[in-house]
Amino acid sequence: MSNTITQGIATETPTPVAQLVTVEGSSYGPYRALNTTRVQDAYMRLPFSRSTAQQIVEDLTRDDCGLRAEWHGDELVFTWSSDYMGEAGTETVRPDDSGLYLVGGLWPWDFSAKPSLPTVDLTKQEREFFVVGTDGVDDYEIWHVVEAPADESDAQDLYDELHWDAYDAFGSVTPIFAVSHAHAAGIARHECHL
């Protein structure tokens, strides 16, 4: 059996919804898909960025379940043995016009994944940070995290400077109270998934 999966002719579609999924019954994921429907079918093919598709491939190679995936240029080729699906086969996934890969159908998805916040030392004092970045296709892309000055006037000046620099590059600045730079970055990524 051999299938080729490519997205068809562009038609008007609803705005994609970022959705976290895991491979059902495993610890793999969560993976961020851009679902264009509100349907949640366990065996549906979901659109993923190349980097997320790469993570799925890496996770698949950890198991000896009879399903494999490898890259051939821009094509992602899944192969499976008869032990995996009753009949050996291959499936080739090519990127659509947006560079997304429709992956799935060969295992069930679990749509109940929730992003987790990083573990932090709550005995530390929270302070303000400015997280600078942009909400990308696959994740909140953080350009840098800056601790805000304690002086309110200085903090406003720094925020204004960062805001206009980020605005020029189609980014944004998010003020976040956290105990560390890494904690602030984790909160920004978490809020992106909500």
Image (tube, rainbow, N blue to C red):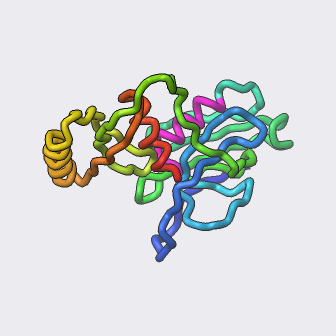
Q: Is residue 172 above or below residue 74?
A: below
- Identity of the residue drawn at 50% across and 37% down: 72
**Residue 107, how many percent across, how many down?**
74, 45
Q: Main secondary structure of the magenta part?
A: helix
19 or 106, nearer to the observer: 19
- Identity of the residue drawn at 15% across and 43% down: 153
Residue 53 located within the stretch drawn in magenta: yes
Residue 194 located within the stretch drawn in magenta: no
**Residue 164, how many percent across, how many down?**
15, 51
Task: Specify the segment rendered in magenta.
Answer: 48-60
Residue 110 vs residue 17: left or right? right
Residue 118 appears in view: yes
**Residue 168, how many percent across, how many down?**
16, 53
Residue 35 vs residue 15: left or right? right
**Residue 148, how many percent across, how many down?**
25, 36
Residue 114 vs residue 84: left or right? left
167 or 50, nearer to the observer: 167
Q: Is residue 32 above or below residue 72?
A: below
